[in-house]
Image (cartoon, grey):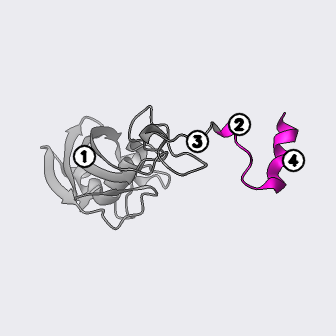
């Protein structure tokens, strides 16, 4: 979805509101996917020297726990506010995803904000113990292997590393 920010800054007298769904299921988030299209609300309000933009996003994230690899699902509901002036849109280093004509790409903006909002490392719980490095079972599920620091190295050629660390 495109929003003509340049035109809005020049001519707007009343707020602009839009409700839209954006399907980012094919987007590369590097560790999570969206279960369904993100539900978004966008508002642009004229101000004395530009515009106040508000983006609200609701998204359902699917991922695997970084420690135990169990599937997890999280809901994110957040909003971002931006203050924009005409000189910002004309600046080549403008932080919002605009095309040369001053059109704001709202789907790209939602994608960028999701990248910032969702942690790079997702855990099923804060106290997740992860997988046993010896048997591969979940530690919380009752793994009976000795602690890793007391176990023999898997590969004898790596035993020199343990001696160096001692």
Q: Magenta stretch containing residue 160, yes or no? A: yes
Vertical relation: 128 (above or below) 72 = above
Say whether residue 103 is visible.
no
Q: Are marks 1 and 4 in contact (CB under 8 Å)?
A: no
Query: Could you tell whether 21 is left or right of 29 in the image?
Result: left
Residue 131: % across, % down: 51, 46
How far, Cα to Cα, is label 4 from label 3?
Answer: 23 Å
The C terminus - image quarter:
top right
The N terminus - image quarter:
bottom left
Q: Which residue is mark 3?
A: 145
First-in-chain label (3 vs 2): 3
Q: Quadrant of residue 103?
A: bottom left
Name the one closer to the observer, 44 or 35: 35
Q: Which residue is mark 2?
A: 150
How far, Cα to Cα, is label 1 from label 4?
Answer: 52 Å
Q: Which residues are magenta?
A: 148-166
How far, Cα to Cα, is label 4 from label 2?
Answer: 15 Å
Q: Residues within 10 Å of mark 3 (few under 14, many from 20)?
A: some
- Frontmost of labels 4 and 2 is 2
Q: Residue at x 39, y 64 (%)?
A: 100
Q: Secondary structure at mark 2?
A: helix
How far, Cα to Cα, is label 3 from label 2?
Answer: 10 Å
Q: Residue at x 32, y 53 (%)?
A: 62
Residue 57: % across, % down: 24, 46
First-in-chain label (4 vs 3): 3
How far, Cα to Cα, is label 1 from label 3?
Answer: 44 Å
Q: Are marks 2 and 1 in contact (CB under 8 Å)?
A: no
Q: Which residue is mark 4?
A: 160
């Amino acid at each position: 979805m495109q929003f003509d920010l340049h035109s809005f800054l020049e001519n707007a007298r009343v707020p602009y509101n839009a409700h839209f769904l954006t399907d980012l299921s094919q987007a590369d988030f590097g560790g999570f996917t969206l279960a369904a299209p993100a539900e978004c609300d966008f508002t642009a309000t004229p101000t004395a020297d530009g515009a106040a933009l508000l983006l609200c996003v609701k998204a359902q994230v699917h991922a695997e726990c970084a420690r135990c690899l169990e599937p997890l699902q999280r809901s994110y509901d957040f909003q971002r506010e931006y203050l924009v002036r005409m000189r910002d849109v004309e600046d080549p280093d403008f932080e919002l995803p605009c095309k040369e004509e001053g059109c704001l790409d709202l789907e790209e903006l939602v994608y960028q904000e999701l990248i910032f909002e969702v942690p790079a490392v997702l855990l099923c719980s804060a106290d997740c113990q992860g997988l046993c490095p010896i048997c591969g079972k979940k530690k919380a599920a009752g793994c009976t292997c000795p602690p890793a620091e007391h176990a023999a190295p898997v590969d004898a050629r790596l035993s020199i590393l343990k001696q160096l660390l001692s």
